[in-house]
Amino acid sequence: MVRRSFLEKGFLGKRYSGKRLLGKRGFAMQFNWIFVLIAGAVIIGFFFSLINNLIHSDDAGTKVRATQEIDALLKINLASENTQKIADFGSKLSIVFFADRETTYSEYSAKGSPRTARYDFNVIFSPNQLDADELLIQTFTLDTPFRSMPVVYATNREIEYVFLNMSSRVIQTILAFVPANLTKKMIWEEEQLAFMENYPDRNYDRTVFVTDDINFNYIAGVRFDSFSRPAERLFVVVITPGPGAIASYGNISFYRYTQDEGFVLNGTSPYFDHRLMIGGVISHDRNIFENNMRKVLKRINLLSGLYDRRIRRYAGEFEQCTQLYVNVLDTLTGSSGSIKSLSEDRGELTYEDMSLIFAASNELKQKNSAIVGGRDCPGIY
């Protein structure tokens, strides 16, 4: 056995001790590097998260401002009678409309906005979503049964409305009152109607076929296999008018397209004024249509009560007109078939009530004309 000297032992001891010291220092340095990497990753992640939040916050803020501007635009137009205009947004914008069919709750917003704007007391007939850089707006004042409230149609030129059979009085009535700049396609002849399966996909956001109940058969069983995403883009609105020369009251049926069954009924709703019927065409959405109809009826019911008090005041002050006013009160508020009674919220909207409101409205107009033209008496409205 080789014996090591004291010096050798000391030298080796120092050498081994140095290795041990170097190992500790290396471990400490390695730990520091790991700590730096982790801390750096956390800091970088924090900054990325901050930037991402700022980007999304700015995007949300932009959409909130867009919602506010849309709200201001539509409400300004509600104050403008009998106008048509095109509102240019400057860039493409998606507007979402929501309406509860069973109440008057309704709202709209720029898509993705965390805030919405309510329009529970305003009548705006629109599709449930509009994607475009502009908005077509038409405003008129509803005067059935009396001057009641402003009504707005809101749509755009990216929706194609296709009218079937131009000889139909329903179609003729609609075309006389829709916004002038609407994207319209007219199918004139029965020979064309017989080949609706060949109707081309013209790349509009939506294609809405509009017809009456007589001509619905031309499109009822047609399959549109050549269309891209037909379930999202194809709709049918069918008008079933009541008897008479014009489509002044009746039913509107709303159809949506399915890949398996073609056009499927999505519900039927009644109307009592041809301009409200056109609102159903513009919206092609039962929820939005019935929601707005409830707003109209609610306003008529309120005004009926106000006109009742006004007429009773007239009857007490103008004795020569008393009997005329009594007759008016019977139509306005006096019976179960009066305008006030028929406009009350009964749950479901019914064809019978709407036809009676139309009849009572005509009767009220005739009585008002007799008061104004026959005697020196203040008019009802």
Image (tube, rainbow, N blue to C red):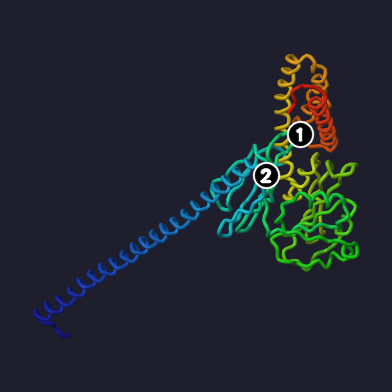
Badge 1 amino acid: Gly
The residue beneath circle 2 is: 124
| Kind of residue at disc 2 | Ile
Q: On the rendered structure, is 114 left or right of 120?
A: left
Between label 2 and label 1, give the one nearer the viewer: 2
Residue 43 percent location from the top left of the image? 35, 61
Image height check: is 163 above or below 366? below
Q: Which residue is mark 1?
A: 347
**Percent position of residue 31, x then y:** 29, 66
Q: Nearer the viewer, residue 165 or 50?
A: 165
The circle drawn on residue 306 is none
Q: Is residue 348 above or below residue 34?
A: above
- Give coordinates of residue 254: x percent, y percent: 79, 50
Q: Earlier in the sequence, mark 2 or mark 1?
A: 2
- Count residues near mark 2 (Cα–Cα under 10 Å), then give few for <14, some for 14-19, many for 20+: many
Image check: 136 left or right of 343?
left
Q: Do callouts 2 and 1 mark residues in contact (Cβ within 8 Å)?
A: no
Residue extending furthest toward the bottom:
2
Q: Residue furthest left?
A: 7
Asked if residue 325 is positioned above or below residue 65 in the image, the reply reads: above
Judging depth in this view, the residue of 124 and 377 nearest the camera is 377
User: Mark 2: which secondary structure?
Assistant: strand
Q: Secondary structure at mark 1?
A: loop
Q: Which of the 4 quarters of the picture holds residue 287?
A: top right
Lateral position of residue 361 relative to residue 61, left or right: right
The residue drawn where x is 14% and y is 83% is 3
Please state the horizontal and vertical placement of residue 17, each as a whole percent of the image: 17, 73
Q: CA distance from mark 2 to mark 1?
A: 21 Å
Residue at 76% in and 47% down? 278
Q: Total number of numbered labels? A: 2
At horizontal 41% and vertical 57% (from top left) the residue drawn is: 50
Q: Quadrant of the N terminus?
A: bottom left
